[in-house]
Image: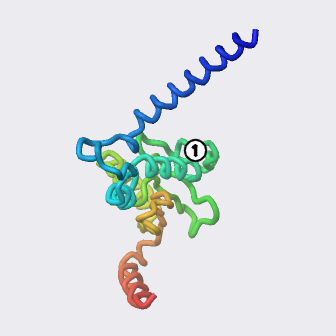
Amino acid sequence: MRKQISKEHNRKEDGADLHLAKTIMQNKQYSLGEEDEYGFDVAPSRKRHKMREEVPDKRNISNRLLTQQERCQFCFENPSRPKHLVVSIANFTYLILPQLQRVVEGHCCILPMQHEAATRSVDKNVWEEIHNFKKCLLKMFASYDKDVLFLETVVGLEKQRHHCLLDCIPIPHKLTEKTPMCFRKAIEEAEDE
């Protein structure tokens, strides 16, 4: 009976060794090229390791964006987004009321459904829908004798943490002419910052 147990144990060990050998052979880190076959240095070269560090892994970027979309309160697929504030839904964008505090009555926001960092990086279809929302808002507020000021604040563009958000703030017609001057003055004052 001992001999049977030891034979079965040896078979299991041989199977485990065979599995380990196959795994090692399939691993690219341990594969040897023709020039390395008779060499003594079988470790991966430092040059290859440096190249991996310099080039960002596409999977890590997509995983990072996926987790941002899950965390982002404005991504349309996120179940925790404020659904009660949505005013209108198009194919690629939607119109929403401000979540915290509105600047003036009628303040609303245009957002793309997918996570984008800025309007400069959106697709053509998304841009057309944003443009259509703008036209409709301009027509609507014109009936109330108001113009609309469209503002986009882009922060941390390279990290893509923030969702593209276009604030639409209605202002009286008489203030429309002064608006560019106010912005120019504010930009000049904030230039040092």
The residue drawn where x is 64% and y is 63% is 100
Q: Is residue 131 left or right of residue 100?
A: left
Q: 61 or 11: nearer the eye? A: 11
Q: Say above or below: 189 vs 138.
A: below
As shown in the figure, which amino acid type bears the numbered disc 1?
Asn
Identity of the residue furthest to the left in this view: 35
The residue drawn where x is 40% and y is 51% is 43
Q: Where is residue 136 in the image (x, y as percent from the top left)?
A: 39, 52
Q: Is residue 132 visible?
A: no
Element on which disc 1 rests: loop
Q: Quadrant of residue 164?
A: bottom left
Identity of the residue furthest to the right in this view: 1
Q: Is residue 5 left or right of residue 137?
A: right
Q: Say above or below: 46 vs 132.
A: below
Q: Can residue 25 be seen in this view?
A: yes
Identity of the residue furthest to the front in this view: 3
Q: In which quarter of the image is residue 31?
A: top left
Coloring scheme used: rainbow
Q: Where is residue 81 in the image (x, y as percent from the top left)?
A: 61, 48
The residue drawn where x is 27% and y is 42% is 33
Q: Position of residue 62 (x, y in %)?
A: 44, 47
Badge 1: residue crowd in 10 Å (few <14, some 14–19, many ≥20): some
The residue drawn where x is 60% and y is 24% is 13
Q: Position of residue 180 (x, y in %)?
A: 36, 80
Q: 97 or 104: nearer the eye? A: 97
Provide the residue designation for mark 1.
Answer: 78
